[in-house]
Amino acid sequence: MAEFSEVLKNRRSVRTFTDEPVAEKDLHAVLEAIQWSPSWANTQCWEVVVVKDDKIKEQLAETLPKGNPAKKGMAAAPVVLAVAGRKNEAGYYKGAVTTKLGDWYMFDLGICAQSMWLRAKDLGLGTVVVGLFDHDAASRILGVPENMQLVFLAPLGHPAKEPKAPERKKIQEFTRTDRF
Ligand SMILES: Cc1cc2nc3c(=O)[nH]c(=O)nc-3n(C[C@H](O)[C@H](O)[C@H](O)COP(=O)(O)O)c2cc1C
């Protein structure tokens, strides 16, 4: 296992994969990272489809626009995780919305995405969260039920190369003291 600070800083978006399969114990560990993610009132509204079927991966890849740099990797990765959120649960109490921000499923899925991403890195695997695709087409392919919204796809495998880190803003650029 790697140092946490290393995993945090060196996690990258991996879009090219070797042919090596993902070991079942590693896949389990990645799913466990999702399992232990925090969520609104512990609602755990995430639902994950583990896609291993080559045909389905290819069909999912077709839902990404041509310019999406993750398109090839979606079909080539040994596993794709398709993550959906159950609607009207996170941020709700007894069926009623509790904050002006409405449904918090995107927030909870964002956290679970980061947990999954960091654990993959920790295991020497690579992944990328893919949000730019035709969500309706991919939902039809996967048979996503009406009460759920498919949010992201994540091809998962052994990195074929270590991508360079895109630049980050300086901390001072997004931080203020006391007030805006
Ligand atoms: C919500 C979200 C959606 C993303 N969608 C895509 C995508 O559709 N295709 C892609 O290649 N990368 C996608 N990315 C990856 C980002 O481009 C990447 O995280 C960013 O450029 C920073 O690079 P790094 O992850 O290597 O640090 C997405 C990332 C996030 C968090």
Image (cartoon, rainbow, N blue to C red):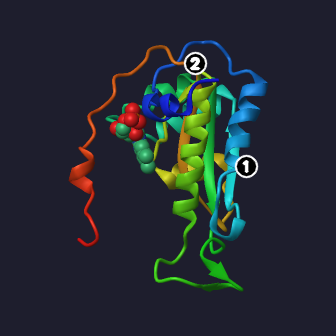
Disc marking residue 158 = 2
Viewed as shown, does residue 148 lie left or right of 66?
A: right
What residue is at 55 percent from the left and 37 percent from the top? 117
Identify which residue is drawn at 49% across, 26% down. Answer: 73
SS at circle 1? helix
Q: Residues within 10 Å of mark 2 (few under 14, many from 20)?
A: many
Q: Is mark 1 within 8 Å of ligand 1?
A: no
Tell me if residue 19 comes above or below residue 102 in the rendering.
Answer: above
Label 1: few (<14), some (14–19) or many (≥20) C-alpha neighbours in 10 Å: some
Quadrant in the picture for the C terminus: bottom left
Residue bearing the label numbered 1: 35
Looking at the picture, tell me which residue is in the foreground, 11 or 146.
Answer: 11
Q: Quadrant of ligand 1?
A: top left
Indicate which disc, 2 or 1, sits on the residue closer to the N terminus.
1
Q: Helix or strand or loop: what does disc 2 sit on?
A: loop
The relative height of residue 104 versus residue 157 in the rendered view (above or below) is: below
Residue occupying image coordinates x 66% and y 73%: 89
Which amino acid lies under the numbered mark 1 shown in the image of this protein? Gln
Q: Is residue 174 visible?
A: yes
Quarter-of-image position of residue 55? top right
- Residue 65 appears in view: no
